[in-house]
Image: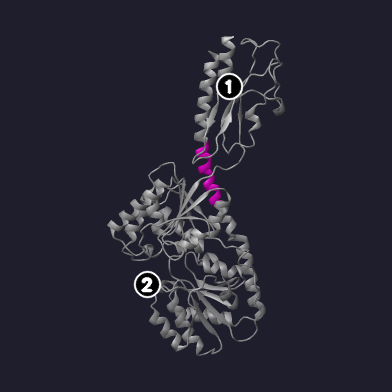
Amino acid sequence: MFKWRALAVALRARVLYRARHGMECATVEYRPCCVDQPKVPDPVFDRALQVPDFQALWWVRPQKQLGFERPAPCARQTTENLSYRLREIELDTRAPIPLKIALVANTSWYLHNFRPTLMDALQQEGHEVVAVAPQDAYSRKLVEAGFVHHHIPLDQRSINPVRALHSILHLRRVLRDERIDAVLSFTPKGNIYSGLAISDPSVTFVANLSGLGRAFSQNSRLLGLAAMGFRWAFRRATAVLFQNGDDLRLLVNRGIVDPAKAQRIPGSGVDLQRFSFRNCMRGDENVEFLFVGRLLWEKGIGEFAGAARELKSRYPNIRFRVLGPLQEGPAGVSRSTIDAWTEEGIIDYLGVAEDVRNAMEEADCIVLPSYYNEGVPRSLLEASALGRPIITTDMAGCRDAVCDSVTGYLCKPRDIEGLVSTLEKFLSLTVHERAEMGRRAREKMEREFDETFVIDQYKGLVSRTTSRNASSTSAMAVARSRQGLRKIRR
């Protein structure tokens, strides 16, 4: 009798595993089944469709419903005739384990304007999304959208090492206190600070390089410092995502990024449903060119104004409009300069808009004569998705968004005369040729730059974190299971 009770207690030993952050525990039990007792269903197989996603080997009794032959029930319950053939099976239910994912950027404005679809998609997968960025007017909007927001002191223009260290330590404290499982970083400082702030080796770190910015421009004094910061930060990275092939080849060839970690993504992608196709068949001579972007000199706003001054004297009915926020500092265009251009009559400044669709739909062509180190400019993708031809420069990132003479035109950077010639080439097109160019631009976006491609790639990287966490958890459970079985066999 004592042996039977000891065996029953041993066979009913529970193998518990708990997913992180307070998930509900699932229990696996081993129980004897014989004539003297009612048939007890095997919880391992009963719970197989409810257990969170993991791949592990479990020692369990074979079951008839899975094709195994169950031993015949015994006439008398003894330790000798309890015949359990233990088999290894693999459970893989594909149900994701919820994670805590932090998105780090240098402004809340960036996360609100460029990453809302990604954040929503991760939240719909059951993950908890945390926005980590300096406090600004868009921080409240992130909270109202259902995301947790944490402020970090990050100055975009400062290169003070003391301030940088303060920002890194503050970010490290946020990641530790929130028990973050995965970090998705954006913008140059966001990438560097995130890589240096992560102290837990189990945290997944995915860096997104949306262009190299001014630091990697020619003769930049920050080139060495930026290269060293990227090299240190990306040692911790699980993957480094590049928005164009030029940046990928540059950093891989310089040994800054491990080739095994480098991956190419189609820019930030574009929401094809939100930016649906709008045909433009306007036949009058009031052609409208629109510049959309931050008002930085390197974005080509000076060349745009210079081309407008020259063309307005030849084609008085065309319009040049500018939409975008002013930028402080010597790299940005001052308000007085914008006012002077407006008074001269060469441009119309539209200010800042939460939704750029209305302005783009009214335009005939979107112009971005940038010589900035872009990823793939979001404004060009959105304009093409709406069915608008684009004119941009033959620069890394910009050239990826256009097929020259098919969906728009390419021109040389920092060349006002070249831009004027390209704009005149567009003016010479018929209405139907412009409409056909816009239609092909839309097809290119559907084929290459759908935002779902980017989101699916992020989901795949995050799922690796889920599998790694679950496999380590299940390995502990398997060890406990085998330990219990050894006690039974004794």
Q: Which residue is mark 1?
A: 12
On the rendered structure, is 456 left or right of 77?
left
From the top left corner, tell me how far across and down residue 76 is, in percent. Answer: 68, 10
> Which quadrant: the N terminus?
top right
Viewer-side label of 1, 2 = 1
**Quarter occupied by residue 13:** top right
Q: Amino acid at mark 1?
A: Arg
From the top left corner, tell me how far across and down residue 162 is, in percent. Answer: 27, 56
Which is more toward the observer, 2 or 326? 2
From the top left corner, tell me how far across and down residue 203 is, in percent. Answer: 44, 44
From the top left corner, tell me how far across and down residue 16 is, in percent. Answer: 53, 30
* 420 lies above or below 241: below
Residues in magenta, as a range: 457-470
Rendered residue at 44%/74% (across/down): 300
Q: Amino acid at mark 2?
A: Glu
Q: Which residue is mark 2?
A: 328
Rendered residue at 56%/68% (across/down): 382
Can residue 310 be seen in the rendering of this structure?
Answer: yes
The main secondary structure of the magenta stretch is helix
Residues packed near mark 1 inside 10 Å, few (<14), some (14 to 19) or many (20 plus): some
Rendered residue at 54%/84% (across/down): 319
Q: Secondary structure at mark 2?
A: loop
* 5 lies above or below 255: above
